[in-house]
Image (cartoon, coloured by chain):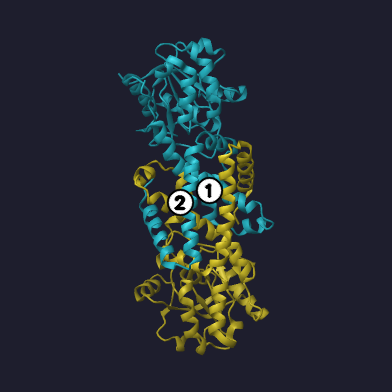
Chain colours: A yellow, B cyan
């Protein structure tokens, strides 16, 4: 019998939550999807688009008999949701999330779920898009994309298999890391590049001749700064949530930049070429998962 | 009568030079194109692809009656070409180039062209591509793209109009800057981002867990580091040629990065958001030329 869920409750029915619901529906893996959220307009839109079957009215009524709850809100809102769902969780209700940072989400889950912590299997789907909201949701957003699970010691094998199965039903490829490993890895390959890209645009935007500079910027600048158009609130929260790992990364990067600065200051062309060659080889051979 | 050139001589028949020739041909603006280059295989390929009519044998024979010469080699090779063409230039032969830096090209032109310097109208076409070589040349590479001319005080209005017309015949949109302005602008919007992108990949490539890190990198990393796959030799030369402006840019950027580091260290979420917000607004409103 294929894995299926009778009732799935989704907090946050935008790109991440909406795509999860659509993907489970396409896989015929869910009977009923109930949505909660802060914006009734968003919830109505999600219902109209067929993402959810019903808008939830009362958390107490909905989470007790849910098979699976997805928290797909900004990470900063998750503590409050854990507080509100904790007293009503059924014995068999599993929880997963879509947050971009994991240590902080695990910490607020531990603080608020109490002895229900075993029911939470944290996840980070590596799938974003420029757009957000229910209208941006896609049934194939997770198809072939990585979802990183960061299981807790308390999770039972059965819980892990069920949550893993839900994400796999969405088409995702599952990886496992500890929450700390996850945050260290993403500080390096995602949070740092975002910070660096924001910094370049901010550097240029503050200048008297910023309009002239931007008028001559071309495709290299375009790609380098694409992520600087990302949501300021979301990235403020991610940076704060993963502050320590990101501070370490910025330091390492500043050291690397100083090496390049010195090579340039010393007119050390061969050192520059050596650095560029390694980068070019590694980037050229990298195949995105 | 539309602008046309009886004979155009191109040094370097790859992406930049080859596309120039193809675009002039499409515009019916040239009768004969003669190619020179260091690699006979490249020249033969350019001839086979219809980019050039003939492979040049002897510089002395070819440049005297040329209407226009394009230097489309790496910048580091241009000094030698100026030396070799200088004694043979006709009184009406104009020269332009496709170099990514301008002060250094102007300096070697001045050093080697002597009183023929008025015949050289420096240019930088803002059009690159991942590929290089004659096979990558496109007749519409310059269509709608910017070409920055950095005229010299010695250039006559007529020379300027003719060289401008050649690039416009290729479909380009012309801007004018002084060589120094050009190099300052491109240090900020092109050379700095390349250096920063190389630095990130090098930073990650040197780590023990670089393979793990790269396996989790996604679309943000992909776009940020696309330019880190660029030619190491070319970027070594550009960095060295525009060393002083680039050193200034790296310093300004390091200051900016320190502002972000401090905001993060002080857990100053509102300062982070303020910086991200300005960047996101500016990048979101930027329309690439």
Q: Residue at horizontal 45%, vertical 36%?
A: B127
| Residue B147: image location, x then y, percent | 40, 33
Q: Residue at horizontal 51%, vertical 31%?
A: B15
What chain does badge 1 belong to?
Answer: B
**Is residue A145 at least partly visible in the picture?**
no
What chain does badge 2 belong to?
Answer: A
Query: Quick one: A227 or B244, which is closer to the camera?
Result: B244
What's the distance in space between the residues labelled 2 and 1, CA to CA?
9 Å
Disc ID at residue B98: none
Disc ID at residue B196: 1
The residue most toward the right is B208
Left or right of residue A80: residue A166: right
Q: Residue at horizontal 53%, vertical 40%?
A: B130
The answer to whether marks 2 and 1 sit on the same chain is no
Query: Quick one: A199 or A83, which is closer to the camera?
Result: A199
Name the residue that disc number 2 marks: A200
Label 2 sits on a secondary structure element that is helix
In the figure, B206 relative to A32: above or below?
A: above
Label 1 sits on a secondary structure element that is helix
| Residue A265: image location, x then y, percent | 56, 40
Q: Are marks 2 and 1 in contact (CB under 8 Å)?
A: yes
Q: In which quarter of the image is residue A215?
A: top left
């Amino acid at each position: 019998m294929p894995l299926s869920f009778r009732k799935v409750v989704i907090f946050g029915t935008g790109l991440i939550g909406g795509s999860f619901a659509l993907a489970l529906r396409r896989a015929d893996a869910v009977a009923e999807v109930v949505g909660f959220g802060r914006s009734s307009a968003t919830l109505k839109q999600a219902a109209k688009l067929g993402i959810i079957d019903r808008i939830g009215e009362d958390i107490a009524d909905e989470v007790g008999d849910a098979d699976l709850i997805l928290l797909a809100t900004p990470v900063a809102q998750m503590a409050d949701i854990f507080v509100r769902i904790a007293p009503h969780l059924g014995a068999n209700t599993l929880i997963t999330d879509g947050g971009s940072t994991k240590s902080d989400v695990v910490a607020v889950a531990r603080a608020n779920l109490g002895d229900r912590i075993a029911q939470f299997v944290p996840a980070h789907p590596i799938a974003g898009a420029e757009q957000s909201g229910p209208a941006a949701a896609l049934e194939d957003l997770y198809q072939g994309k990585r979802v990183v699970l960061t299981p807790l010691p308390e999770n039972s094998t059965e819980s892990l298999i069920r949550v893993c199965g839900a994400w796999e039903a969405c088409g995702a490829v599952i990886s496992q890391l500890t929450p700390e490993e996850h945050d260290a890895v993403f500080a390096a390959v995602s949070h740092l590049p975002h910070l660096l890209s924001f910094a370049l645009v901010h550097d240029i935007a503050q200048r008297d001749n910023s309009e002239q500079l931007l008028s001559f910027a071309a495709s290299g600048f375009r790609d380098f700064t694409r992520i600087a158009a990302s949501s300021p609130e979301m990235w403020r929260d991610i940076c704060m949530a993963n502050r320590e790992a990101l501070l370490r990364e910025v330091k390492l990067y500043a050291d690397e930049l100083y090496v390049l600065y010195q090579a340039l200051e010393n007119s050390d062309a061969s050192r520059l070429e050596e650095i560029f060659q390694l980068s070019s080889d590694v980037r050229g051979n990298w195949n995105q998962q």
